[in-house]
Amino acid sequence: MATITVSAPGKVLLAGGYLVLDRAYQGLVFGLDARIYICVQAATNSETDSNSRKIIVRSPQFEKAHWVYSYVPAKDGVRITQSHESESDTRNPFVETTLVYVLTYLFHLSIDLVGDLNITILADDDYYSHTKSSTKGSFSKFGVTLANAHKTGLGSSAALVTSITAALLGAFVPHAANSEFSSHQHVIHNLAQAAHCAAQGKVGSGFDVAAAVYGSCLYRRFTPSLLEHVGDAGSDGFGERLHRCVENLDPHRPWDVEVLKQAVQIPRSLRLVLCDVDCGSQTPGMVKKVLAWRKERPEEADLLWSALQQGTEDLCAELKRLAQLEAIEEIKRENLRDTISTIRSLIREMSNKSGVPIEPPSQTELLDACCTVPGVVGGVVPGAGGYDAVVLLVEDNEKALVDLQNLLDKWKSTTESGSGIAKGRVSLLGVKQDVQGIKMEPAGTFVGWI
Ligand SMILES: Nc1ncnc2c1ncn2[C@@H]1O[C@H](COP(=O)(O)OP(=O)(O)OP(=O)(O)O)[C@@H](O)[C@H]1O
Ligand SMILES: C[C@@](O)(CCOP(=O)(O)O)CC(=O)O
C-alpha cells in the first residue's frame, strides 16, 4: 500500500444560502486556502490477524485526539469498532463513518484490505479561533480537545471527510491519485457526500463537500433521494447499493449534481476576507424555521427566492466580467457594489419575513461599518448567516487590510444589547479564496507530526 498525503479546502458560501437546499436554485461557493491534510500509511509493527485489522487515527494538534478502530470486512459492508486503546473519550462520527463508507466501497471492488493503517490529520489554524499553545512547521498545537475547540465555520468536517476519502482511495487504488485525482473526482465526490450525510445524520445541500473536492464553483445540489436510497451502513445489500451509487451505475437514480467551475472567478485585484465574530450564542434550527416559513408562504417566498437566484447569477457574472476586463483596463466596481447590496437587502427581507436572524441588526451594523473602509467593495453574512461571521470582498492590498483591521480593533456593536448575545471581538481570519479542490501534498508536510 502506498503512503499518501492529500489536502482538501474549506469553504465559504458567498450567495445562495437556504436556496441551495433546493435543486431549482444555486449556491456560489468559494474554496479557501485553509485546508485539512491527511496522511495515510501502513502501520509498521502490525500484528496481522487474517480477520481483523486496525486503523489508528490521530489528530495531533488536539489533546487526546487518538482513535483506534478494528475493522472486519463483511458481506453488507465493513464493520468498525472503536477500541479501548483510544485515548479519546468521545467518538469522532465523521472519521468513523468515512472509514466505514470508504472501506466498504474498496471491499466491494475486491481490493485486498491487508495490514494495519495509520491516519494522521492536520488542519490549518483558521479552522479554529484558539490561542495556539505551540507551533511546529506551519501547523499549531491548540492545547485543547476537539470538543473544546471553537470552530470558525469553514467546513472542517467536509474537508476532513473528503480528504480521508481521497487519501484512502489513493492508497489502495494508486492510479486514482494521478493528476490530482482528476479521473476520480466524481468517485471521491459521491463517496464523500454519502459519508458526510450519514455522519451528519441528514442530507444537506452538500455544497461544502463539493467545494472540498472541486474548489470554488457555482453549485446545484443532487436529488436527495439518491443518497437516501443507499440506506444505513450494515443494512442488507448496503455494500452493493453504495457501490452502484458511488459509480453512478443506477439508470433510475443518476447523479444530477451540477458543479460549474468556469462560472466563478474573482478579479485579481480583489480577495475574500472572512471576519470571525466571537459571539456567545448561535441560533439553533435556522434552516428549519426558514423552510417552515417558505412552506407557509410559498408565493412570497418564491418571489424572494427568484430575486436572490438572480442576485447570485448577477454576482457571478459581474465578478467574471471584471476579472476579464481587468487584464485590459482599470475596473469600476460600482455594479459589483450594487449587486452585493441588492443581495443583502433581499437577505434582510428573508430575515424579517421568516423571523430568523440571518442578517441580524448587529451584523448589518458591522457590514455597513466595514463598507465605509475605502478598500472594501461589499460584504454579506455567509452560508446560513447568523451572528458568527461576515465575508467581505476587499482590494487585495496591504492598505485595505490594515484599514479594515484598524476598524475591527475598535469595533463595538451598539445593537441588541438586551438580546442575551454576548458581544465579542471581531477578528480577521488569514484565509482567502482558492480555486483548487482536492490535491496531493508533498511527503514532507507531516514532518515532526508523525
Ligand atoms: N482537525 C480535526 N481532527 C479530527 N476531527 C475533526 C477535525 N476537524 C473537524 N473534525 C470533525 O468534524 C466535526 C466538526 O464538524 P462540523 O460539521 O460540526 O463543523 P464544520 O464542518 O467545521 O462547521 P460548518 O459546517 O459550520 O462549516 C468535529 O466534531 C470532528 O468530528
Ligand atoms: C443554510 C444552508 O444553505 C447553508 C449553510 O451554510 P454554512 O454551514 O452556514 O456555511 C444549508 C446547506 O446548504 O446545507
Image (spheres, rainbow, N blue to C red):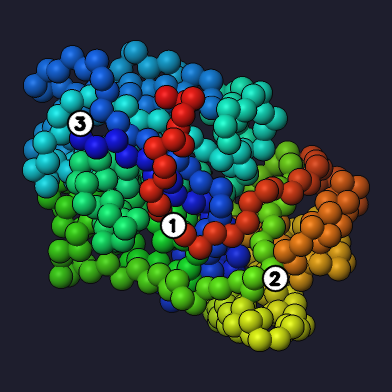
- Residue 350 at least partly seen: yes
The image shows residue 332 at horizontal and vertical percentages of: 76, 83
Residue at image position (58%, 36%) is 138
- Residue 318 at least partly seen: no
Q: Secondary structure at mark 3?
A: strand
Q: Is 87 left, or right, of 190 in this rendering? A: right
The image shows residue 307 at horizontal and vertical percentages of: 60, 81
Name the amino acid type tagged 2.
Ser
Circle 3: is it few (<14), some (14-19), or many (20+) Cα within 10 Å?
many
In this figure, what is the number of numbered marks?
3
Give residue 269's mark: 2
Q: Is residue 239 above or below residue 267?
A: above
Q: How far apart are the two marked residues, 1 and 2, measured between alpha carbons?
A: 22 Å
The image shows residue 304 at horizontal and vertical percentages of: 61, 78
Residue nearest the observer in this picture, 327 or 336? 327
Which of pointers 2 and 3 lies earlier in the amino acid sequence? 3
Q: Quadrant of the N terminus?
A: top left
